[in-house]
Structure formats: structure tokens, C-alpha cells
Amino acid sequence: MGRLAQTEGLTDVQKEIVSTVRDFVDKEILPVAGELEHRDEYPTRIVEGLKELGIFGLMIPEEYGGLGESLLTYALCVEEIARGWMSVSGIINTHFIVAYMLKQHGTDEQKEYFLPRMAAGEVRGAFSMSEPGLGSDVSAITTKGVRDGDEYVLTGQKMWLTNGGTSSLVAVLCRTDEGHPQDTPPHKSMTTFLIEKEPGFGEVKPGLTIPGKIDKMGYKGVDTTELILDGLRVPANRVLGGETGRGFYQMMDGVEVGRVNVAARGCGVAQRAFELGIAYAQQRHTFGKPIAQHQAIQFKLAEMATKVEAAHALMVNAARKKDSGRRNDLEAGMAKYLASEYCKEVVEDAFRIHGGYGFSKEYEIERLYREAPMLLIGEGTAEIQKMIVGRRLLEEYRLQG
């Protein structure tokens, strides 16, 4: 293990968990990631291994069968997993966000029903906000939930569900206008519904269709799908928290933690790109010496390492802020923005160090080069992060008088 991206102040338990995950990545993920990724194959064996390690219950409280660990511990594990293969960290992230939303906002019945099975990895979560014409404007969602007795009838189309096919529980954000005055702001007329379904594709239950996997440039292996609701009936007791109109706040709370996760993914991918770049620079010879001895390459390595270290520090700070119970949208936005931008730059520099071989599918850097762009848009684009950070800074530094 190199000197970069070390985290001070960890407990012995945290160190042991992160070390165990790192060993798992080195032995079970890195040797097979390239082959599985090129085949766009779901990593079933890897997921089963992570279930055995207890990763699916890492932040679920012990009373529900989880490990009850902090966001920092989780983020450091994600960083290690993304270093091996970013798609695997995506499989865990959406599950974790739904479990976090249940823990924070669910009714006692919802927690007792879902969390123990989620901790064991038996129930796997996905969440859904985006729609085909939505982009970053969550307040413009059109998917509706209409009350009908003891049920809600859901109709609409959702987009970009990570784990859409393999999940068995989906948290879906819908508009529910009943009971709200006509002039209610859009974000106050949204509700999160907990939808149980069978894993798979096609019509997985009456009124709910998962058409199939979206073919992507990178981020392969994990299934990204649409979700079509056509008169799907959901019991009223599957409104998250038991109260309508709270969905936007619940989802934003989940996404805030998810942004720390995406920052951790950026850190992990950047670390791997740096490892590949510095190793190749010492093996490849030009003009009679290893290219690592050329000043131009040393400059690149210095810049890459500095970016890896800076992104890791910001990510750790954002996680610790949330763990302390304080608001962390500023720190999470900064961490997600910087880590994803630096990840792209570090991967590109490692790609350049590889020269022509970086373009070959035989070399791991080719896969990382296709994966890094997803982090620029996942969990909110760079532009959205800058808007969040800018607004929060104006709040913090508002001129008086």
C-alpha cells in the first residue's frame, strides 16, 4: 500500500474493515474486472462475496442486523471497491442510499420490515428520481401518485435507475397533489414510494415494467434501466415515513450522502489510475532510460499524486462532517465536484503516460478512461455542485446591513 490517500484517526475496527475490503478487491475484483467489464456481465460472484463481508449492511444499525458503521467507514470501503472496479461500488451505492433513507425517515414498521433483509443483502435497493426529459430539474417531475382508498396508483416513466433490474426494492419519487393547496411549491408536493418487485426485466409486476439494460459507454456490468409505471398500485403504508409531501427532502438527504459516495468513487478510480501510471512509467523505456526518469513524466506523476491526495482529503472531511450530525451539503458538493474532475484528469494523464497502449483493451487504463466520465454527471453534474456550493457560500458570507 502506497503513501497516498491515508486517513488519520481511524479506529482499529475501521482499519480492519478497510483492510479486509482492500484484500478482497486485490484478490477477487482486480483479476476479473476487465474480463467482466468487456462482456458487460453482472459480477454475481463478487456481489455474493461482498454480502458475506457484510458490506450491504455496513451503515445499517446493529439492531436491524447491520454493522452500524459510520459514513466515513462506508466511504473508505467504496474508495477501495472503486479502485478495483467502479461498477461494483455503484451496485452498493443505490442500495445504501435507500437503506439510509429508510433509517432516517422510515416508519418503525418500514424499518423493521426492510432493514434486516437489506443488511443481509437479501433485499437490494435502487432509487429513482430522474425522468427522460428531466435532466437536473427534479422539481419538474411528472410521474404521479393518486390516492385510491388504501392504495396509491402510480403512473409515469423514470430513467437512469442503477440496479433497476437486479433490485427488489425501489424508492421512487412521484408528485402527489392531493391534500396540498394549488399554490404549493413543487418540491412540497412530492412523495417517496417504496416499491417491492421481483428482480428481472419486462413486466416484473402488474403496472411495473423494466424494459431492459441501457447500453452504456462505460459503467458496465451494473444494470442501468428505465422504469415504466402504468397504473401500479402501491399500499398507502409504503409511503416513506407514512406522510406525503416529504419526498423531495428525503431524496435530497439521500443524495447528499450519495455525493460523498461518488466522491469516494472518484478517489478510488484516480488512485488506481495513478498506480497504473507510475508502474508503467518505470517499465517503459525510451531514449535509453525508463520514461519515469524524463522530467515531463515526473511532472505528470507529481500533479496526479497531488490531485489524488487533495480529493481524498476533501472526501474524508465531507464524510466526517455528516457523521458529526452537522449539515454537509457544502462539503459534499465540493468533494463530489473536485474528486470527479480530478479523477478525469488523473485518468487522462495515466492514459497519456501509457501512450498508444492506453488505447488497447488489453490495458486496464482503457477501462478507467471510459468509466471516469460517469462521475462527472452521476448524483448531480459538476454545474449542479457549483450551484450548491455557490449558494451555500453566499449564505455563510452574507454581508450584514
Image (cartoon, rainbow, N blue to C red):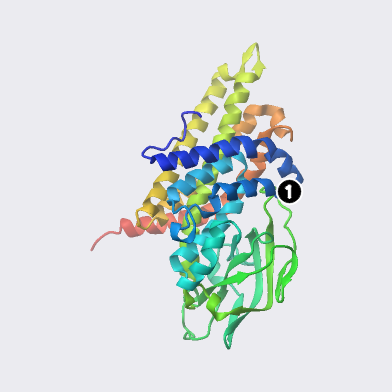
Compare residues 125 and 174 and report the one nearer the observer: 125
Residue located 40% across and 59% down the image: 391
Q: How many marks?
A: 1
Q: Three-letter amino acid code at disc 1?
A: Glu
Residue denoted by label 1: 41
Circle 1: element type: loop
Compare residues 263 and 27 and report the one nearer the observer: 27
Question: Could you say where residue 40 lies in the image, as x and y percent from the top left?
Answer: 74, 48
Up the image or down, 271 lies above or below 105; here it is: above
Q: Quadrant of residue 203?
A: bottom right
Question: Could you say where residue 15 lies in the image, as x and y percent from the top left?
Answer: 44, 39
Q: Is residue 357 visible?
A: yes
Residue located 49% across and 58% down the image: 65
Left or right: 104 as drawn, with respect to 396: right
Up the image or down, 107 lies above or below 331; here it is: below
Compare residues 384 and 57 and report the one nearer the observer: 57
Left or right: 179 as drawn, with respect to 288: left
Question: Could you say where residue 240 lies in the image, as x and y percent from the top left?
Answer: 51, 72
Residue located 41% across and 38% down the image: 7
Left or right: 182 as drawn, with respect to 362: left
Left or right: 108 as drawn, with respect to 207: left
Question: Could you say where residue 239 lies in the image, as x and y percent from the top left?
Answer: 53, 75
Residue furthest top as drawn: 288
